[in-house]
Amino acid sequence: MAITALPPDTDADIARVTEALAMITPSWNVRILLALSGPPQRYTELAAKVSWLQSGQLHPKLKSLCDAGLVERTEHTARHVTYRHTERGTALLPVLPMIVEWAEEDLEKADRPLSAIEQIEDSLTLLTRRHTAAILWVLKSRTEVSGRALARIVMPSSDSTNIYPALRQLVADGLVDTHGRGQPYRLSGAGYRLGPVLGALSAWSSGQPLHQAAHHPVWGHPQTTPAPRPWVSSQARPAPAVLPPARTAWDNRDLFSHTPATRPMAGLQGGGPRR
């Protein structure tokens, strides 16, 4: 069933990325995935790594990650059960440093240094708000779009005024810019720089290797931001680097709470800004 008035391939792509974000955004999911890095672990071993979870919280989280196909449960005997990443879960992990890299440049500064995991969680909170993915896709594809036009594309079966709360939130988050009331909307520099993250999530959700993100029909296209203008919604942001030109075509038919800081993730550095 179509969720937007966009072409079927694009509509399906947005739906898959939205679903992928929904798998990892719930509280603790990313932390559990990171704690599972390495060889299979017994429940007690994993529980010791995520000791801030209260009794009874870890099991349903593990079950949801198993149901999502990110974690595998192996019952060796009735008393010996282990958990590990599936191939799909392992393939998703390289997206996390990409999110941290974006957050360090484009999220607002926090009052204290944040761990990498906190930056990931803050970033995911922005990206999983309703209609966010569809709005970002449209603005990247069409450069500037009026609110009414966005409403017809993103939520064709709803009243056109329903688009404005989502747009106001994206402006407040710094992902979208506008001259003001009644003026068209377009991606901010931060919105453009999300391209590698969203392209990688699209590649992962369609079962393709992450390097295929460079060939995504929307986020893989080389495109610079328009010349800077005095946007009233947010401070000026530097234009993103131009992405390398795609060498091969992407086949769209193949597309498919906040917590206390913990130990740093392997390969990721803590600190950085926050929205």
Image: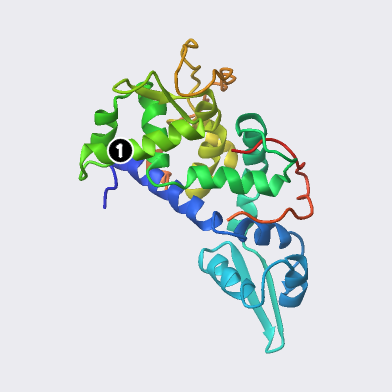
The answer to whether 114 is drawn above or below residue 139 in the figure is below
In the image: residue 39, left or right of residue 27: right
Most extreme residue toward the bottom is 78
Task: Give the colour scheme of this rendering.
Answer: rainbow
Determine the residue positioned at 68% across, 42% down. Answer: 97
Tell me residue 26's x, y (percent): 54, 58
Residue type at the position of mark 1: Ile
Question: As rendered, which of 6 and 187 lies closer to the eye?
Answer: 187
Q: In this orientation, does residue 186 appear?
A: yes
Tell me residue 17's x, y (percent): 46, 47
Count the numbered circles shown: 1
Determine the residue positioned at 56% across, 68% down. Answer: 66
In the image: residue 57, left or right of residue 182: right
The answer to whether 161 is drawn above or below residue 179 in the figure is below
Mark 1 is surrounded, within 10 Å at the Cα level, by few (under 14), some (14 to 19) or many (20 or more) other residues, namely many
Quarter of the view holding residue 253: top left
Quarter of the view holding residue 4: top left
The answer to whether 251 is drawn above or below residue 39 in the figure is above
Tell me residue 233's x, y (percent): 45, 23
Q: In this orientation, does residue 207 appear?
A: no
Q: Which residue is mark 1?
A: 163
Q: Quadrant of the C terminus?
A: top right
In the image: residue 270, left or right of residue 134: right
Secondary structure type for disc 1: helix
Question: As rendered, which of 75 and 261 lies closer to the eye?
Answer: 261
Quarter of the view holding residue 79: bottom right
Tell me residue 261's x, y (percent): 73, 53
